[in-house]
Amino acid sequence: MEQAHTEPERQLLPAPLEPLGLPDAALETAAGEEAEGDLEEGSEDCTMKENNFWLKKIEISVSEAEKRTGRNAMNMQETYTAYLIETRSVEHIDGQSVLTDSLWRRYSEFELLRNYLLVFYPHIVVPPLPEKRAEFVWHKLSADNMDPDFVERRRIGLENFLLRVASHPILCRDKIFYLFLTQEGNWKETVNETGFQLKADSRLKALNATFRVKNPDKRFTDLKHYSDELQSVISHLLRVRARVADRLYGVYKVHGNYGRVFSEWSAIEKEMGDGLQSAGHHMDVYASSIDDILEDEEHYADQLKEYLFYAEALRAVCRKHELMQYDLEMAAQDLASKKQQCEELATGTVRTFSLKGMTTKLFGQETPEQREARIKVLEEQIREGEEQLKSKNLEGREFVKNAWADIERFKEQKNHDLKEALISYAVMQISMCKKGIQVWTNAKECFSKM
């Protein structure tokens, strides 16, 4: 942080954006405090007043999916999936019971909502949507986005997305999110009226800032590197899991051959027939159980995929910080250039080559009145530049403070969720192995009775 008594010129140096000091306890509550501040100071366009706020008092679910046919913006026939969102009050409001409300949304509308949130809340790690098309699938799993099993998993993912947003201390209060849950007609028009597309940073501008920023903040550079590594690690984990699923499926199905052989054998035996027939039945059950096992595994894979996509949400926050830092540096550079021009005009000396200096040598000096007028214009531009730079500095510091508070919240969420998912996956593998042991134990008893 800067010291209390620094010179004005030193405050305008394009140093990396520094966060305002936050003690450990403040990190845990900053997001909640900012949410309260949004309610008190935010405009009605983006945030809801407290007396209209009820998202924390309702249950949200995406209860079913439905295949539909219609025409797109190009007036071409298309098939798509619509999802039924149901909201139900868990409390009485103003002494009256609120009934269940429901509406249908397409996946593209979920995308529109998230894009809006990314633009209006660039300091927040916005929850990701589930995959649009299946990735990291094993060979028996359909990659068709209309496959019923895939649609069901995506329904669960979309519900999880809504619950993530609804549980966020800031996003849950957004008016557009509220209308997404309650206003079926004209919702797209309402979103577009916010003008969020015009406020979105272009990819080219973000790429330019990444390579041209001179004083990157090490914390955000490290976070960007971590997000890349996290995405890489989870991608490898999902690929390994898909390969294991392929081989496991084959091993289980091969056990069906035991069942067939034991059944055929039992037909030619008298004393051993019943035992062999029973053992064959256990092998058949074992072979068929893998379908349900791997279907359950897909839900754990989807939990990992959520954090695979969260990595991109982290990078989005880092890119926004780079853009702000780049704008700050460009503003400081422009201000320094104007100060130099003003000084050169005032002293009559030219430190660097300029087209204006060459023109002066060729066509003569300016009159004192002309020089004085130019100095006044530059002085006014310098004052505006100083105010602009101070404003960008304050804006940057506020962004860093809010972003880092939300990143701390995300880290806590990530650690908890991935720990639970990995433990549950391990428990599932243990249960699967125990079932295999039980099958062979039952087969052993069948053989013993022969």
Image (cartoon, helix red, strand yellow):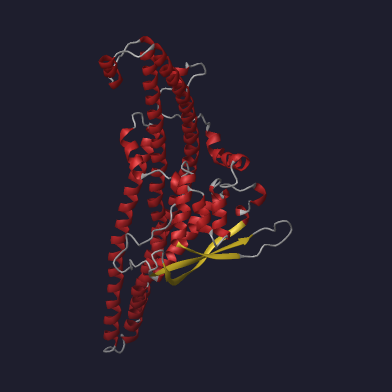
Picture quadrant where residue 360 is located: top left
Measured as percent of width and height from the top left, residue 298 is found at 39, 63
Q: Residue at x 40, y 25 (%)?
A: 332
Among the 4 quarters of the image, the one containing residue 248 = bottom left
| Pick the front one: 48 or 429 | 48
Extreme-right residue of the structure: 95
Q: Is residue 37 above or below residue 413?
A: above
Report whether residue 301 is seen: yes
Left or right: residue 59 compared with residue 109: right
Q: Residue at 61%, 41% (x, y): give it.
A: 36
Left or right relative to 430: residue 60: right
Q: Is residue 328 above or below residue 35?
A: above
Quadrant of the image containing the C terminus:
bottom left
Q: Nearer the viewer, residue 78 or 10?
A: 78
The quarter holding residue 87 reads bottom right
Q: How many marks?
A: 0
Q: Position of residue 20 (x, y in %)?
A: 50, 29
Q: Left or right of 82: which side holds 233? A: left
* In the rendered image, the vertical position of residue 82 relative to residue 312, given as above or below: below
Q: Residue 417's x, y, as percent?
A: 46, 51
Tell me residue 424's x, y (percent): 44, 57
Q: Residue at x 31, y 87 (%)?
A: 271
Q: Looking at the image, which is closer to me, 222 or 209?
A: 209
Residue 164 visible (yes or no): no
